[in-house]
């Protein structure tokens, strides 16, 4: 782009053509007051505070909406400009109510800041407060539009950044204000309570509802969100060493910029929950009693040592956490392998469908790890499968919606309509568990219609011949019909994707399916055939449920891989770690977390050490899991909150939450983000790495690390993927280092080819007439995972969600069900009872069951069966029958 040259305040500056005067000034360190401008929003020109004067033409103009032009002679603080600005601010203040003095935005109100900078105290104008009804009905956002200056930032953020469209201008002139459609309360609109408008509002018109703390935090610190695997940057406000508010970090280059979701913005109040663990405890009789750290750690070291000696290392299991940091996971699995001598170590990522994801890892040799979400802006097409990111990973969904609104073809394949459906070019209402067949049908059509990338296939892949032969022999019509969809939509999908690189967004609807591994193979084949893999416009985006699901696997907190995802069966890799740790490592694959429960039931597992997970709530068949754990000789739980599992533990250790310690998480993009402590951990609780470090030395580790840096140094020395982590300090980030030997990921185009895999035969399913409905389990944006943390958020609880089971209106009519009726869902494994809601986006025969509600009773419906087992139903769906219990207001069934 051509550069232009102009003068600002007598200084000669240049900028690319099209740059606004405001941006040209700011890039050269010249400040101009502004209220309606935000770098991430389209300029709007509403407040006129950014006025500047061009001495050459004598014109006064709003600098945020006026492009810099050659030879302008701009003055930002001429007497004329200052006079205009002061008048604008005076009028805004004259319209403001007296409550301005006790506003919760306090000293951070930009209007007050600007008025103070201009020396405006009294306005000398007749006060005309524009009183509006204070809206305080929901537990998240307070709207006091008396303080609104109509800058339009909230509306633009809602439309442009999070693409929800919950609010717009309502009425004209003095009565004008941002409002929902038909001016209903936010809680009755399509507002998602992401809070982005609240953070971006320059005045106190929009504020966070908080009954416990109102005012300006003492300090603000950056960190990374501890909930989902998107890994948003946060700015936490702290008062009296407690987190009192959370805002988007608005860090340049971060995954979220100025946005967050309802969890990130509002649910971090769980940090101050009464259920926080603050002291080590040991079971004495029926009671857990507070003890010293010394007593708790000595007891654990002694009991685990005795069990190892008497029953062998394989009688001990360790259940680590996809919410704990990389450093903590590294230490955790090291304790398992190097001190206790067992590979019985796993983490919650198992539940997210790790076995399906292993397919990607093995076929790409660990490639395909880095996929920045910002690349979606330049995607040619996006195919979303088995995912509703607007609920599970909202900030990812904003990027998808922005791309779709910008013209990228968006195809949504899902059994139920998702929040992305209205913006999609095509919605394919597929039958549950049929994604693999649909993808193969799509590949067959694309192959027949030349929708493949010959150059890419020849250069980077092998085995295309047999694969394409199999595609040629396919009957897409027949296969397509088996998926519950039609040829017309398949043809349309092929037309939309032909010749384009595809960004594949894959959710738990795929990875948690019984046939998840088969489906991942089909997706990889499609990605290779279209040349999408490794390209900036395409590739694979797998949604990570927890903040460090990716990192926990990388660190080896899994039963079959060493740190760096090196297979345990690889003798060379084992030898390297043996040399590093100076111990012998067992070559035998350990127990995954379901097998640990099974072996506890059988009495073979004697001790379990759980860090940062709540398996009684998160695993299927919670009662069975509890009974299995009650059979253990010794159960240690290290966590931040009292929960279903701490209640039956022998020893409970209080850990620190993410913002109470230093560490790093690896997000779904392959970005390793470091963070530093924001507030001290409550009571006597300690960072998990410190607890593990103290325990390790008591159990025979040669010496204490004593600091996170020393653990990190050991990790980065030995794990090539994380070699760049050592460059990070404070809150910096780096990317996983590419170590794949596949040519497509190599910068110099050398290496081995990626093989196509053969098409696996379709799975036949036998319908069970006793259980005629298919229940799909899925998350809602207010909760994460099993909901242990979000259920402890006062705001989330205060919103009064019921987690109603959703039925199609057709099924509702057939069973005489109305909104608010209570039903029992019964699967072959168990039952739950909930209220219902009729939902148009659902097809007859399907039932949607939100997870994380009512102690996560949705998992009662699932079997506790390992994914690899052919009997497994996966963790996403099951067959159920329905019994109506009771109608609303006592209407009997
Ligand atoms: S509510 Fe806030 S962000 Fe929205 S228009 Fe008013 S002042 Fe601007
Ligand atoms: S909270 Fe989010 S969804 Fe709701 S109005 Fe504000 S920006 Fe829109
Ligand atoms: S999208 Fe995920 S990481 Fe981002 S704020 Fe929401 S919960 Fe946190
Ligand atoms: S900042 Fe330019 S008009 Fe508001």
Image: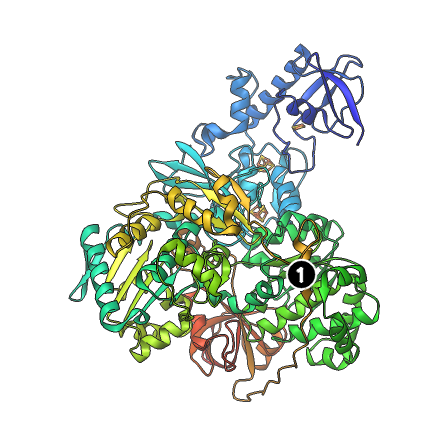
The quarter of the rendered structure image containing the N terminus is top right
Q: Quadrant of residue 333?
A: bottom left
Q: How many marks?
A: 1
Can you give x and y, in whole percent of width and height, for residue 62 in the image? 71, 24
Q: Position of residue 272 (x, y in %)?
A: 35, 47
Scheme of image coloration: rainbow
Q: Which of 596 and 802 is in front in this view?
A: 596
Compared with residue 240, is residue 50 higher up or lower down, i.e. above or below?
Answer: above
- Residue extending farthest to the left is 285
Residue 366: where, in percent of width, then height?
Answer: 58, 59
Task: Evaluate whether residue 450 shows in this view.
Answer: yes
Q: Which residue lies furthest to the right in this view?
A: 449
Disc 1 Cβ-to-ligand 3 distance below 8 Å: no
Question: Where in the figure is residue 243, as x and y percent of width and height?
Answer: 39, 41
**Which sits in the foreground, 448 or 361?**
361
Q: How crowded is mark 1: few (under 14 residues within 10 Å), some or many (20 or more)?
A: some
Tell me, yes or no, if residue 135 can be seen here: no
Residue at image position (57%, 34%) is 148
User: Where is 90 relative to 214, above or below?
Assistant: above
Tell me which residue sits at (50%, 17%) in the image: 121
Q: In this view, does 502 lie above or below 256?
A: below
**Secondary structure of the residue carrying numbered label 1:** loop
Q: Is residue 293 left or right of residue 832?
A: left
Question: What residue is shown with label 1?
Answer: 752
């Amino acid at each position: 782009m051509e550069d232009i040259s102009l003068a600002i305040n007598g200084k000669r500056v240049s900028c690319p053509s099209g740059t606004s005067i405001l941006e040209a000034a700011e890039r050269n360190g010249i400040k101009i007051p502004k209220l309606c401008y935000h770098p991430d929003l389209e300029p709007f020109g509403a407040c006129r505070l950014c006025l500047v004067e061009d001495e050459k033409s004598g014109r006064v103009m709003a600098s945020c909406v006026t492009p810099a032009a050659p030879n302008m002679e701009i003055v930002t603080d001429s007497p004329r400009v200052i006079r205009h600005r002061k008048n604008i601010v005076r009028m805004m203040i004259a319209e403001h109510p007296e409550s301005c003095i006790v506003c919760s935005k306090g000293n951070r109100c930009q209007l007050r800041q600007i008025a103070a900078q201009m020396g405006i105290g009294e306005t000398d104008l007749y006060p005309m407060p524009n009183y509006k009804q204070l809206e305080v009905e929901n537990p998240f956002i307070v709207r006091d539009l008396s303080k609104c200056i109509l800058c339009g930032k909230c509306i633009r953020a809602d439309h442009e950044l999070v693409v929800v469209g919950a609010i717009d201008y309502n009425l004209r002139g003095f009565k004008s204000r941002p409002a929902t459609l038909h001016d209903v309360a936010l809680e009755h609109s399509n507002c998602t309570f992401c809070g982005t408008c609240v953070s971006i509002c320059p005045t106190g018109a929009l504020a966070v509802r908080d009954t416990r703390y109102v005012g300006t935090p003492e300090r603000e610190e950056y960190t990374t969100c501890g909930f989902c695997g998107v890994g948003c940057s946060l700015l936490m406000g702290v008062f009296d060493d407690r987190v009192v508010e959370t805002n988007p970090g608005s860090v340049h280059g971060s995954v979220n910029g100025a946005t967050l979701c309802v969890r990130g913005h509002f649910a971090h109040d769980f940090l101050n929950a009464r259920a926080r663990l603050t002291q080590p405890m040991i079971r004495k009789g029926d009671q857990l009693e507070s003890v010293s750290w010394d007593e708790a750690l000595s007891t654990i070291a002694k009991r685990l040592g005795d069990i190892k000696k008497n029953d062998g290392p394989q009688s001990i299991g360790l259940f680590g956490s996809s919410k704990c940091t990389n450093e903590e996971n590294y230490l955790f699995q090291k304790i398992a392998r190097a001190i206790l001598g067992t590979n019985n170590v796993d983490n919650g990522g198992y539940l997210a469908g790790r076995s399906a994801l292993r397919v990607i890892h093995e076929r790409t040799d660990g490639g395909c790890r880095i996929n920045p979400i910002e690349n979606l802006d330049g995607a040619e097409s996006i195919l979303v499968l088995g995912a509703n990111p607007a609920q599970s990973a909202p900030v990812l969904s904003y990027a998808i919606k922005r791309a779709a609104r910008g013209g990228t073809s968006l195809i949504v394949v899902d059994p139920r309509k998702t929040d992305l459906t209205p913006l999609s070019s095509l919605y394919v209402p597929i039958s549950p568990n049929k994604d693999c067949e649909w993808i193969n049908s799509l590949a067959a059509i694309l192959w027949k219609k030349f929708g493949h990338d010959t150059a890419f296939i020849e250069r980077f892949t092998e085995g295309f011949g047999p694969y394409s032969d199999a595609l040629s022999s396919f009957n897409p019509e027949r296969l397509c019909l088996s998926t519950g969809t039609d040829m017309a939509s398949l043809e349309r999908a092929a037309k939309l994707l032909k010749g384009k690189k595809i960004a594949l967004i894959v959710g738990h609807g795929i990875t948690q399916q019984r046939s998840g591994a088969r489906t991942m193979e089909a997706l990889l084949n499609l990605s290779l055939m279209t040349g999408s893999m490794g390209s900036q416009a395409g590739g694979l985006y797998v949604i990570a449920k927890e903040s460090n699901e990716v990192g926990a696997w990388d660190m080896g907190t899994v039963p079959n891989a060493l740190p760096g995802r090196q297979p345990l069966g690889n003798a060379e890799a084992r030898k390297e770690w043996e040399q590093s740790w100076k111990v012998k490592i067992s070559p035998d694959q350990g127990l995954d977390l379901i097998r640990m429960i099974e072996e506890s039931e059988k009495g073979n597992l004697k001790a379990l050490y759980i860090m940062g997970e709540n398996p009684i709530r998160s695993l299927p068949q919670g009662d069975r899991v509890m009974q299995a754990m009650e059979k253990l000789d010794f159960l240690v739980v290290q966590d931040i909150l009292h929960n279903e599992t701490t209640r039956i533990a022998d020893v409970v250790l209080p850990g620190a939450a993410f913002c109470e310690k230093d560490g790093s998480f690896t997000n779904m993009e392959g970005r390793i983000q470091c963070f530093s402590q924001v507030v001290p951990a409550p009571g006597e609780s300690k960072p998990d790495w410190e607890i593990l470090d103290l325990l390790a030395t008591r159990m025979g580790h040669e010496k204490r690390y004593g600091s996170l840096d020393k653990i990190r140094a050991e990790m980065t020395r030995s794990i090539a993927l994380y070699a760049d982590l050592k460059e990070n300090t404070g809150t910096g980030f780096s990317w996983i280092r590419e170590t794949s030997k596949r040519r497509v990921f190599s910068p110099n185009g050398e290496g081995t080819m990626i093989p196509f895999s053969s098409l696996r035969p379709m799975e036949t399913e036998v319908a069970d007439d006793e259980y005629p409905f298919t229940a799909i389990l899925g998350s809602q944006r207010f909760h994460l995972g099993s909901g242990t943390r979000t259920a402890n958020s006062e705001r989330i609880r205060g919103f009064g969600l019921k987690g109603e089971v959703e039925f199609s209106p057709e099924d509702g009519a057939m069973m005489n069900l109305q909104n608010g009726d209570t039903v029992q869902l019964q699967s072959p494994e168990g039952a739950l009872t909930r209220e219902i809601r009729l939902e148009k986006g659902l097809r007859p025969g399907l039932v949607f069951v939100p997870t994380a509600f009512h102690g996560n009773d949705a998992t009662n419906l699932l079997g506790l069966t390992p994914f690899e087992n052919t009997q497994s139903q996966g963790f996403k769906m099951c067959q159920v029958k329905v019994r109506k219990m009771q109608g609303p207001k006592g209407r009997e069934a």
